[in-house]
Amino acid sequence: MAEHIETIGCDLGDKRSDLCILRPDGELERPKPLRTTRQAFIKYFTRPPAHVVIEVGTHSRWVSELLGKLGHKVTVANPRRVKLISQSTRKGDKEDAEWLARLGKADEQLLAPVQHRGHEAQADLAVAKSRDALVRTRTKLVNHARGLVKSFGERLPTCTAESFHRKAWTAVPAALKPALEPIFRVLEQIELQIDALDSQIEQLAKKYPEVKVISQPKGVGILTSLVFMLTLEDKARFTKSRAVGAFIGFNPKRDQSGDCNKQLGIAKTGDAFMRRLAVGSANYILGPFGQDSELRRWGMELAKRGGRNAKKRATVAVARKLVVLMHRLWVTGEVYEPLGYKTQKSTAA
């Protein structure tokens, strides 16, 4: 059936999108570019069903949803796998659309199709991402203020980012107060908005009762658990919990040829936000306030193996094991036991 329908490569742009139609007989057609709007896509794609191939990006979620409703088969390509496009010596929107069409017709698995999350999950996740954007902005402004004061031979007091706008203002040199007063005012407003988003996240967590199950390990908070659930969306999409580590991007890159097997860093192919939260939880687990657990003991032993980046590698390894554990708790709903888990399971068997 698939070989008897058209394959349409669509290179999504912010203002316009280029198309390339590959017919079953191999003939190519290049329609005029479409405006990247719902109205334009509805008008053009109200046509017989086709296989439409697009790349993941800002517009891919709503475009794939819209085209699916219009009766088309949609493949959302992972750009990391489309090397023919990213490394081409003749790269352009028209050429990209043609490559997408040809790869989609040959074998869509070559495109490593991406599954977009649902509308509700996307909207809920946007709350957490907005909070993350504010936190990162706050960090940049705090660092900016500290850097300016250091250039005048002074230092601002050590304090948390949350209390910085209150505790550091009195230590700002008089010559810098006109320059930094707007920064401190913005920091005060950012703190209020972060508090408001924290309240929203607590309310959102009540919609997802399994958040409490996932957040059982000490160091995994409501925010991390909620983002984990919304990022994966469906716990049944993974037959094995171990696959979650690779999905989030904690799997090591591989470059092997003959007897040469290079030691590389992690792939970082998954959701960067979720990966940062998992690493933050791993840092807490391995830190001075971390709860004694098998995961902490394993990570601490790994950090002792020496090497310049031993602690960093141990943190990433703990983060990978942690997301696997979180998925396991989500699937089974069992009570988390920080110590003696394997012994208890074997005794029960």
Image (cartoon, rainbow, N blue to C red):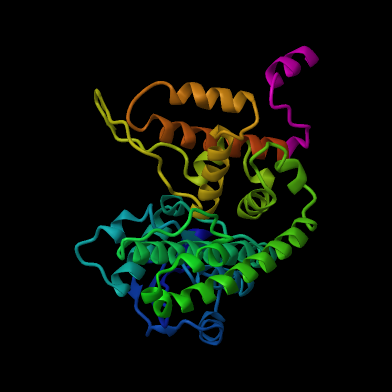
Front-lying residue, 305 or 47: 305
| Quadrant in the rendering for residue 280 | top right
Residue 138 place in picture, x, y as percent? 50, 65
* Residue stretch in magenta: 331-349
Residue 235 place in picture, x, y as percent? 68, 45
| Figure check: 72 above or below 327 | below
Q: Is residue 328 magenta?
A: no
Specify whether residue 78 is in view: yes
Residue at 36% x, 76% y: name it. 175
Specify whether residue 26 is in view: no
| Figure check: 138 above or below 336 | below
Q: Is residue 128 left or right of residue 186?
A: right
Residue 3 place in picture, x, y as percent? 47, 60
Front-lying residue, 232 or 113: 232
Residue 262 place in picture, x, y as percent? 28, 31
- The quadrant of the rendering that contains the C terminus is top right
Q: Is residue 348 magenta?
A: yes
| Quadrant in the rendering for residue 68 | bottom right
Q: Is residue 10 left or right of residue 340?
A: left
